[in-house]
Amino acid sequence: MHISEGILSPALLAGGAVLTICGSAAGLKSIDYDEIPVMGILSAAFFVASLIHLPIGPVSAHLTLNGLIGLILGIRAFPVILVGLTLQVLLFQYGGITTIGINTLNIALPAVLCHYIFKKGASLNTGKIVFNLSVFSCGFFSIFFSAIMVGFSLSLTGRAFLPAAKIAVAAHLPVMFIEGGVTTACVLFLKKVRPELLE
Amino acid sequence: MIWEKNNKTSVVSEIDPRIKLIIAFLFSIFIAVSKSFPVLIAAFCIGVVLVSITKIALRDIIHSLIPVNLMILFLWIFLPFTFEGQPLFHAGPFTIIKEGVVHSAGMTIKSNAIMLVLITLVGSTSIITLGHALHELGISKKLVHLFFFTIRYINSIHREYLSMVNALKVRGFYPGNNIHTYKTMSYLIGMLLVRSFDKAQRVHSAMLCRGFNGNLYSLKEFSLNRTDVVSFLFMISLLFILGTFEWII
């Protein structure tokens, strides 16, 4: 999911950085100082989730959980994901300084979008089927849009990148189902154990 | 902690972290924008020199370069064939295009050069110091708070995660391609969130009891000395020279 340094065109990197700054500013504005510890946990959970590898067929993939974070946080997901990704850059060198902007945008924007699309269906008082379906779609489409955006960033850099971009999107297809399922099971668990986390 | 690298002291680690951040930032942007081969190779050499001054173990450097080069390798599979331009030679049904090879090679040098500069920065500064430096450079206070809380919780969540994985192993859990695995892992993540949430509330209350007023204090005073200024000017002039070459070629 991470796009490495030195691949994308400078214009795209700049655009991504500007949009990420706007999103993060909007997110930070709606966060109180009292809420920062909770945001810190979700950011850390996002980081640790990326270390968890699940088997998919013969290979394994790591979780992203941007759907879950988007569902819980809405626009506040932007700064949370920005911090998580920055730490991944600083600690593991996944991505780099100039790509933090576009990488954050590619992961956080779908999360925020899915929040606004599916939050209504995933509120605590909706019926079981609608609830499960909304939560699954939130996890599924967050990854779906992320993959599309990654592919789009690659193909915007040059037409020659198009086949590689298509393969990258296709490779994410099984991951979308896994993320959808994991998000659903996780949210159902939280609903049972600690419903106030979802409010 | 999961990230503790043995930071040896060197000339680079003594430099003010704010200066290092600014230089790493400018260098990364410059390399990302530049296109000519001689400049990229020069930048790569600067990166190699910087990393070798920092005295980071070769194994750590190679380890850090793996993720970047995996992505580059993925693109190498496609780009030499999909570019439009002069054919270099034919390999069976495929034609290898010169422009594609040139572009991929440039990309490879570029990414590795940027990563070397980043490794120098990260390998010579502790992450907490970097957080304080970001604060000093005028990054939003809330964002820096979030940064510090995240660092704090990554450790505790990761420890919690490892102990839960151990508990699973003790009970004979083996991950496979089945619903049971995915369900178990989802509950594990849910439980991680619940436990860390409780912990965060306890920590936050404890902080309030001790008079936390929203300010972060660094034990290290940042102050610029002569080495900082000299190294800053040196790196900036290097950038200027590279920039001039890029413009001429």
Image (cartoon, coloured by chain):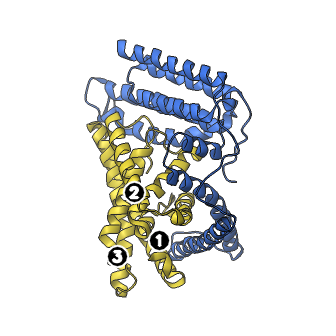
Residue with the mark numbered 3:
A134
Q: The numbered mark 3 sits on a residue in which chain?
A: A
Comparing labels 3 and 2, the label whose residue is closer to the camera = 2
Residue B117 drawn above or below residue A142: above
Decide which of tag 3 and tag 2 comes sooner along the chain: 2
Q: Is residue B183 left or right of residue A158?
A: right
Q: Secondary structure at mark 2?
A: helix
Q: Is B218 positioned to the left or the right of A140 in the image?
A: right
Residue B98 image position (x, y, % from top left) = 33, 24
Which amino acid, mark 3?
A: Ser
- The residue singled out by tag 2 in the image is A108
- Cα separation, mark 2 vs mark 1, equals 18 Å
Letter of the chain in blue: B
Badge 2: how crowded within 10 Å, few (<14), some, or many (20+)? many
Viewer-side residue, A53 vs A183: A183
Secondary structure under badge 3? Answer: helix
Using the image, tell me which numbered label, if any, was put on residue A78. Answer: none
Looking at the picture, how far across and down is residue A2, in whole percent?
45, 48
Among numbered discs 2 and 1, the one appearing first in the sequence: 2
**In the foreground, B42 or B11:** B11
Residue bearing the label numbered 1: A182
User: How far is the residue under mark 3 from the one under mark 2?
Assistant: 18 Å
As shown in the figure, which amino acid type bears the numbered disc 2? Ala
Residue A62 is situated, as x and y percent measured from the top left of the image, at 51, 59
Viewer-proximal residue, B52 or B218? B218
What residue is rendered at 70% in x and 26% in y? B11
Q: Residue at the location (72% across, 29% down)?
A: B10
Q: Colour of chain A?
A: yellow
